[in-house]
């Protein structure tokens, strides 16, 4: 076991990898001398990221490069790196260098001084981000805090330092739709904030467009709260009460001899109620779909290739290894090669 593992999920980050490796290595050496590893996880990049990772791993024995079989998504790529790392302390950081690696020694000092299992970064400022993204992120974290049963820290991303026992508890959770920062909050132990200023992206473009951000937010909400289902029941109750009041009004108008007209208003009510019913069914379908995915028990990720020194075994995923002249096909993820 090494003193420190740094886990970095990467997707189309060829412009960042050289600077990322240099800054991570310098930060790790200042924190733990030479007792560290950097786990780079290639999440199905379409640029030259994997070629660069293999080159870096060949030149630096501290680097382990993991190539997933396809694009699994940020959270599953991060899960793969966490599953395969060997460190006693684990730093999670993105490849875009918006979260400064140079904060690692200070985070380790905070963990040691406060005897904490998790030190999570809290963003004081967010340089280089649009007003729309800052506003939506602000609203999302506060909505999530109110809706979920878990106390998820505000304005905190995946940038954090964890102890091995906290990571082992996290890896015991095998669900498919993963929201890592919420899962870390769920496991408990002593967790302390670390305020910092988030920087602009070093190079390239964001890998979280609006569509992915909305999907990520919905996964977080449905993964840690039954509030959407409760909302559907509350709306149904309100509509039931409204229907009773409407029936009473119709009975009163009939008894008073008033003519009730309004085909348009009637159709409007029908459409509104139908839309609410479809919304409630969609919410229930989302939760049922989650149950369906969990019931299949598929591995969370599949590794196609590993470059560098890897001695850890996958607990949550599947590693396809290549051996020469296999005597029997199939079994244990091995395939014959020439």
Image: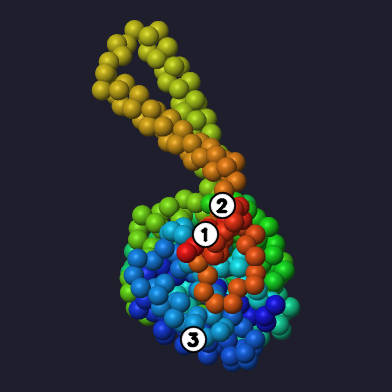
- Residue 83: horizontal and vertical position, in percent? 61, 65
Location of mark 3 (residue): 59
- Cα distance in 3D space between marks 3 and 1: 28 Å
Between disc 3 and disc 2, the foreground one is 2
- Cα distance in 3D space between marks 3 and 2: 34 Å
| Residue under the image location 58 percent in, 90 percent down | 29
- Secondary structure category for the residue under label 3: helix
Q: Do the residues labelled 1 and 2 touch (CB within 8 Å)?
A: yes
Of marks 1 and 2, which one's residue comes earlier in the chain? 2
- Residue 225: horizontal and vertical position, in percent? 57, 48
In the picture, measured across the screen, residue 225 lies left or right of residue 197, that is: right
In the picture, measured across the screen, residue 150 lies left or right of residue 179, that is: right
Location of mark 1 (residue): 336
| Residue under the image location 44 percent in, 81 percent down | 55
Of marks 3 and 1, which one's residue comes earlier in the chain? 3
Location of mark 2 (residue): 329
Residue 199 picture quarter:
bottom left
In the picture, measured across the screen, residue 256 lies left or right of residue 217, that is: left
The mark tally for this picture is: 3
Of marks 3 and 2, which one's residue comes earlier in the chain? 3
């Amino acid at each position: 076991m090494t003193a420190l593992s740094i886990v970095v999920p990467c997707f189309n980050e060829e412009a960042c990898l050289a600077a990322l490796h240099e800054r991570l290595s310098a930060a790790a050496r200042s924190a733990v001398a030479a007792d560290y590893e950097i786990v780079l996880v290639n999440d199905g990049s379409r640029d030259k990221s994997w070629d660069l990772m293999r080159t870096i791993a060949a030149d630096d024995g501290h680097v382990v490069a993991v190539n997933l079989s396809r694009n699994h998504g940020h959270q599953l790529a991060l899960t793969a790196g966490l599953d395969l790392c060997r460190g006693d302390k684990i730093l999670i950081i993105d490849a875009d260098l918006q979260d400064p690696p140079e904060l690692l020694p200070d985070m380790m000092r905070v963990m040691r001084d406060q005897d904490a299992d998790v030190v999570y970064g809290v963003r004081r400022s967010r340089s280089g981000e649009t007003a729309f993204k800052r506003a939506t992120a602000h609203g999302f974290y506060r909505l999530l805090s109110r809706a979920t049963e878990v106390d998820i820290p505000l304005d905190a991303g995946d940038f954090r330092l964890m102890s091995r026992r906290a990571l082992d508890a996290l890896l015991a959770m095998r669900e498919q739709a993963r929201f890592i920062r919420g899962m870390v909050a769920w496991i408990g132990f002593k967790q302390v904030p670390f305020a910092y200023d988030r920087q602009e992206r070093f190079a390239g473009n964001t890998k979280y467009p609006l569509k992915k951000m909305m999907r990520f937010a919905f996964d977080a909400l449905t993964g840690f709260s039954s509030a959407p289902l409760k909302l559907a029941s509350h709306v149904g109750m309100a509509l039931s009460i409204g229907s009773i009041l409407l029936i009473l009004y119709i009975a009163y108008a009939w008894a008073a001899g008033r003519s009730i007209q309004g085909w348009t208003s009637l159709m409007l009510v029908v459409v509104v109620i139908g839309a609410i019913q479809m919304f409630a069914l969609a919410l229930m379908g989302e939760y049922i779909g989650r149950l369906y995915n969990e019931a299949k028990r598929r591995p969370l990720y599949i590794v196609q290739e590993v470059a560098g020194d890897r001695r850890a075994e996958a607990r949550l995923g599947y590693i396809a290894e290549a051996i020469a002249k296999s005597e029997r096909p199939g079994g244990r993820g091995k395939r014959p090669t020439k």
